[in-house]
Image (cartoon, rainbow, N blue to C red):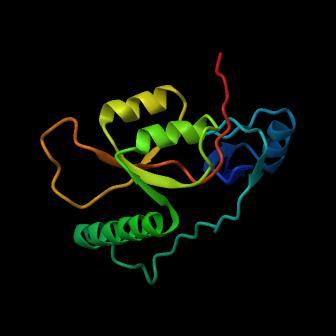
Amino acid sequence: MIRYALRCIVEHEFEAWFSSSDGFDEQVAKGLVECPMCGSQAVTKAIMAPMVRTTKGKEAPQSLAEAQQAVAEALHRLRRHVETTHDYVGNGFASEARDIHEGLAPDRPIYGEATPDEVRGLVEDGVPVAAVPVFSPAAADSETKLPLLPPVAPVIDKKLN
């Protein structure tokens, strides 16, 4: 069995196992390989580093504290990126995201706040959104606004029967 890192036409990355390199080629030719996120069948192999196991020079496993720090730093960089490259729309996020999705407002990356009910409605209506973590104590109120942004990559709508 061979594990390949794959990428679809809209840059979603995922992995899949195949019996051989020829098995991958055959399944792609028959349209049997598709992106699990958008359903695109335009899938290619992504660059993947080989996994080499050695017993010499092994690094000690990362401690939980180090792993948590690395995640916190990555989330902070993500938050900074969003804040510098997206338009802040505040509490009007749900309305503005829906208008952009329906072509009633200019297409642009945005971020802001939405209640869980607003988020649920956007998702049910097929409006792509993603949560951006913030580092503050969560309020007990279930209607606490959650910071959200639509994904940067295009989304392909696919009806599943």
Q: Residue furthest left?
A: 140
Above or below — where is 37 with respect to 73? above
Residue 144 locus on image (x, y percent): 22, 42
Question: Residue 82: horizontal and vertical position, in percent?
Answer: 46, 63
Q: Is residue 150 left or right of residue 107?
A: left
- Residue occupying the point 69% across, 52% down: 7
**x then y, percent, for residue 46:** 71, 59
Q: Is residue 17 above or below residue 109?
A: above
Drawn side of residue 10 relative to residue 75, left or right:
right
- Quadrant hosting residue 29: top right
Relative to 123, 136 lies left or right: left
Residue 121, position as x, y percentages in the image:
42, 28
Count of numbered labels shown in the rendering: 0
On the rendered image, what quadrant is the C terminus found in? top right
User: Relative to the observer, which residue lies in front, 66 or 152?
Assistant: 152
Q: Residue furthest top?
A: 161
Q: Look at 58% across and 66% down and name the residue there.
A: 51
Residue drawn at point x = 33 percent, y = 77 percent: 60
In front of the other: 17 or 148: 148
Q: Quadrant of residue 37?
A: top right
Which residue sits at x=55%, y=38%? 99
Up/down of 107 relative to 60, above or below? above
